[in-house]
Amino acid sequence: MIKYKLTDNETKIFNYIVLLHEKSKKRRETGIHYDALEPIEKVEINIEFEKLTIFSHELHRLLALRGYEPIHSKNMYRNRRVPVTDPEFYNHLHSIEDLILIIKASTQKP
């Protein structure tokens, strides 16, 4: 397993991804279906998810540039149907959650 040592910038991005993901998770746990939301709430959710997609891709890119490319499961690569270098790869909750888990697992102290 790769041991990541995040730079200050990568740490800020990672923490922001985790924050947005936790907010999204809490919203999903309410059980309120997306279609039942007010239009402004839908826009806010869409903007937050777009941020998650962009920042997840950017964090992956930054880590890869330093030789620490996060490795997803074969199923994730197959299911996403786009290369990990494509920002679309992270336009799905499962790939974002996978990235969070990969980094958390490899940066925690024993």
Image (cartoon, rainbow, N blue to C red):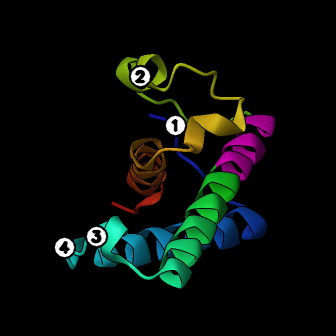
Helix, strand or loop at mark 2: helix
Numbered badge on residue 31? 4
Quarter location, residue 23? bottom left
Side of 71 where 5 appears, left or right: right
Q: Amino acid at mark 4?
A: Gly
Q: Which class describes the residues within 10 Å of circle 1: few (<14), some (14-19), or many (20+)?
A: some
Of the two numbered discs 3 and 1 on the same chain, state the one appearing first in sequence: 1
**From the image, which quarter does the C terminus lie in?**
bottom left
Above or below: residue 77 compared with residue 25: above
Question: Closer to the camera: disc 1 or disc 2?
Answer: 2
Q: Is residue 64 a member of the stretch shown in magenta?
A: yes
Q: Which class describes the residues within 10 Å of circle 3: few (<14), some (14-19), or many (20+)?
A: few
Q: Which residue is mark 3?
A: 28
Q: Amino acid at mark 2?
A: Asn
Q: Which residue is mark 1?
A: 2
Q: Which residue is mark 2?
A: 79
Question: Closer to the camera: disc 2 or disc 4?
Answer: 4
Of the two numbered discs 2 and 3 on the same chain, state the one appearing first in sequence: 3
What is the CA distance from the residue labelled 4 to the residue labelled 1?
37 Å
Q: Amino acid at mark 1?
A: Ile
Residue 17: x and y in percent read: 56, 66
Considering depth in this image, is 101 or 76 the residue closer to the camera?
Answer: 76
Helix, strand or loop at mark 3: helix
Considering depth in this image, is 44 or 80 the residue closer to the camera?
Answer: 44
